[in-house]
Amino acid sequence: MGKTFAEKMLALKSGKESVVTGEIVTVSPDIVMSHDNTAAIAKKFKQIGINKVKHPEKIVIPLDHCVPAATEKYAVNHKEIREFVQEQKIENFYDINTGVCHQVLPEKGHIVPGTLILGADSHTTTYGAFGAFAAGIGRSEVASIWATDEIWLRVPETIKINIEGKIPPGIYPKDIILRIIGDLGADGALYKAVEFSGKVIKEMDIGGRMTLCNMAVEMGAKIGYVEPDEKTIQWLAPRTNKKYEIIKSDADAEYEKIIDYDISDLEPQIACPHTVDNVKPVSKVAGTKINQALIGTCTNGRLEDLKVANEILRGKKISNGVRLLVFPASMEVFAQAMELGILQELVKSGAVIMNPGCGPCLGAHEGALAPGEVCLSTANRNFKGRMGCKEAEVYLASPAIVAVSSLYGEITDIKGDLK
């Protein structure tokens, strides 16, 4: 019987000839990522009683969650991180002028196929779009890796999701992953490896694959994974000179289950308050009034997403009473969108262009909601209080649905001349 990607990766990284699902293995990661939580991790690290991190070259730290600092508390946090970076001689540090961690690490060439990436952020699963084994871990675990360069992981079972059919007009990767999460539920892939495959995945661009893997954790997955192909190689070529090995599941690998989708008739999907798996077709929630619209975050702040929104908004004005916030995922994306005139056109439509960062996604600053307000967002979570207010509601959708809805002031399907 063949082996899955997850089994092969954890055998490789643990130095074993083979492993089986459920086995606990000790591994050494290739990259360990943390962001604004680095200051808290550094405190835990120093409690261990070790003065120097074991492998500073493996550590990558972008600041992205509250940038620039919104309060003195956040400013102190950033200051402590900068001091720790200097003290530990950590070269892979990206300050507030770089972007969201899950966009920055691939852009800067830190992510390549066949690597083991662990991060103090649940959406570290994003990097599986490049054929990496990428999982979120806790702060204490990161601190222990800094000290020992080791961690134990359980070998996960694998769910294979085949996505076939012809993508209908107005349907995007966000709709596909929301439908899957709605079907499987928030715990439908708990501590599983989720492997995305099929014709639709092969045709999908890298940004779309990142969206799927990013949100795999919203159904409980330990990792998301897309088999690298020529698109992956071409995307990475100008960004890294690292040597890498593409690791694939065997044709006769044993999966816990295989789920087949044909999306030819898929309708745009909306995740309704207050859980990501509370998913409904847009027709069921159309007409819901919105106060704020958000395009951005690590899920949908890439150039592809801004282009989609701009195609819908160009030459039109957002509805009175709607605040449209646009957060490019990184400074690279910001610069590209500016050079293409996308940002200028979005501003003409009434959008407010924000600096790259997580923004209001976590409710820390830059667009937090007030009681009774409704936000339609391209983010990955809509939990109660997620955007700063427990009495507000957050709906999740694709950049296209967010853009068209901002024109009407209510959740709206893409139709007529907006297709």
Image: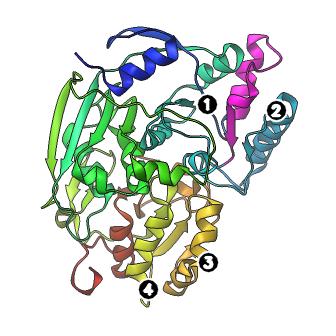
Q: Is residue 65 left or right of residue 270?
A: right
Three-letter code, disc 2: Phe
Label 1's element?
A: strand
Q: CA distance from mark 2 to mark 3?
A: 36 Å
User: In this orientation, does residue 388 appear?
Assistant: no
- Magenta residues? 38-63
Q: CA distance from mark 1 to mark 3?
A: 32 Å
Q: CA distance from mark 3 to mark 4?
A: 16 Å
Q: Disc 4 designates what residue?
A: 314
Number of on-image labels: 4
Q: Disc 2 designates what residue?
A: 84
Q: Earlier in the sequence, mark 2 or mark 3?
A: 2
Q: Earlier in the sequence, mark 4 or mark 1?
A: 1
Three-letter code, disc 4: Arg
The image quadrant that residue 339 belongs to is bottom right
Q: CA distance from mark 4 to mark 1?
A: 40 Å
Q: Which one is in front, 404 or 69?
A: 404
For disc 2, the neighbor class at 10 Å (few under 14, some 14 to 19, many from 20) is some
Q: CA distance from mark 4 to mark 2?
A: 45 Å
Q: Disc 3 designates what residue?
A: 339
For disc 3, the neighbor class at 10 Å (few under 14, some 14 to 19, many from 20) is few
